[in-house]
Image: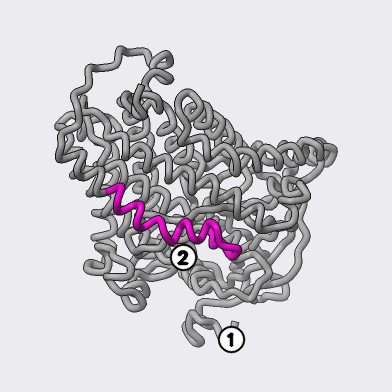
Amino acid sequence: MGFVELWGLDSLWLPRLLLKRGVAVTYLLAFLVAARQFRPLAGEDGLLPIDRYVEHATLREEPSLFYLYPSDRAIGAAAWAGVALSVGALVGVTEAFGTPVSMLAWTAMWLLYLSFVNAGQTFYGFGWESLLLETGFLCIFLGAGTTATPWVVMLLLRWVLFRNVFGAGLIKLRGDDCWRDLTCLDYHYETQPMPNPASWFAHHLPKRVHRAGVVVNHVVELAVPFLYFAPQPIAGAAGAVTIAFMGWLMVTGNFSWLNSLSIVLAVSAFSDPLLAPLWPLDLPAVAPAPAWLWGLALALAALVVALSYYPVRNLVSDRQAMNAAFDPLHLVNTYGAFGSITRDRYELVVEGTRDDDLSAADWEPYTFPGKPTRVDRRPPQVAPYHLRLDWQMWFAAMPTRRRHPWLHRLVAQLLEADEGALSLLRSDPFDGDPPEYVRIERYRYEFTDPAERRETGDWWRREKLETVVQPVSAEEIRRYGVAGQRW
């Protein structure tokens, strides 16, 4: 038995089918997010306007279609074109026309999403953007229909999965002391960027369960990834463990498509014999991949090996960077998550009032789709959909000196009752009318305990700490500018 047969690389039709469908779903979500959120966040009149990207970037360093066409019309056209291509890939239309058409469709999706990531500025600075781009680029070369899968591309997808999972394990081991003394989960479920309905319950699990959870985390992220490259069925077992682990993270948190895409990538560790018993249909007869596709796959492998130098050097470095791209096309990246855990949860509460007299003003809060504001609201489940403003509000709430230029612009747009800004919120207490003043308060939030929740129905308790943005009116902004030296 040769290497290909022993490692189960000779029969990969079903893993390819499931993997490409899973990536197509992720692309679909990503393009829907772009269609819904990109223009109010980074469009012509966004919180970080597209002109800001054009002025500070170069096409070579951050290539994007929007560098050439920085308009809301181009942004909308690109987003909905991506949606159409994703749906076509998901239902198999692009696959039905053979490998060349499939490759063109997947290349177009990758190029379109690259344009959003490179032009999205702060709002697109997440590791799962690079993860989707890297995975989507490799999918171009997987083949389609009844053409056999070039197994070297499937190994490259396992290499992505390895760097994603192992990088997360290393950044934890080198980072916060709580990962080494096994106490990080005492805080994580409560202080993560966006808890979901199960987070409250996970937070109140016994401490010994939290300690065991950290041990499991270390095993899955630091030991299991090496088994992705083992013979079958060991590689498949490693993939199954990773799927279960990522499933738990999805159940207890909202991390966009990081976990769901990791589950999709873990399918690359399987082979047809392992998955066929779970598949209701007969597998088709598969023709060998054409020589030209194999040639492209081998050239791709050589490129990935060359570009892996910096990500590997980063992995073994004592100063490991988290979620970094080393080339402007995001072809081979480094990953990691939660190298440090915050001990306290801070939230910014944005409030407005229609009263002219601030001494007796009645302040009403704006609420967001995902992040906590009202203490009696159950944390929602939104992932794998990504609420980009909600995530940035979590970063902005931290008591650091880091500046967030989009935050003052958000205040200015709320004072104008800007439709784009309001579309990013869950509710507007003024029903589309502009308030007289807006302010931003910082609070410390904590989960209620079981007895308190039974008595009050509240999921959170909170304590006001300070006013981050003093009450400001539209007139003051017109006078002093969005930079807000006066306010």
User: The disc labelled 1 sits on which kind of residue?
Assistant: Arg
- Look at the image and say whether residue 266 sits in the magenta stretch: no
Give me the disc on residue 122.
Answer: 2
Q: Could you tell me which residue is drawn at 55 percent across and 58 percent down?
A: 316
Residue 353 falls left or right of residue 411? right
- Residue corresponding to mark 1: 486
Answer yes or no: do the residues labelled 2 and 1 have beta carbons within 8 Å? no
* Image quadrant where one finds the C terminus: bottom right
Q: Nearer the viewer, residue 123 or 317?
A: 317
Within 10 Å of the Cα at label 1, are there few (<14), some (14-19), or many (20+) other Cα atoms?
few
Q: Could you tell me which residue is drawn at 66 percent across and 76 percent down?
A: 357
Residue 10 falls left or right of residue 453? left
* Image quadrant where one finds the N terminus: top left
Q: Position of residue 262 (x, y in %)?
A: 47, 40
Q: Could you tell me which residue is drawn at 31 percent across and 44 percent down?
A: 138
Within 10 Å of the Cα at label 2, are there few (<14), some (14-19), or many (20+) other Cα atoms?
some
Q: Secondary structure at mark 1?
A: loop
Q: Is residue 155 visible?
A: yes
Q: Is residue 81 visible?
A: no
User: The disc labelled 2 sits on which kind of residue?
Assistant: Thr
Q: Position of residue 93 (x, y in %)?
A: 21, 31
Residue 248 falls left or right of residue 128? right
Which residues are drawn in magenta? 300-322
Q: Position of residue 149 (x, y in %)?
A: 27, 31
Per the picture, the main secondary structure of the magenta-coloured stretch is helix
- Label whose residue precedes the other's in the sequence (2 or 1): 2
Query: Is 285 located above or below residue 158 in the figure?
Result: above
- Look at the image and say whether residue 308 sits in the magenta stretch: yes
Outermost residue on the front side: it is 1
> What is the CA distance from the residue labelled 2 to the residue labelled 1?
25 Å
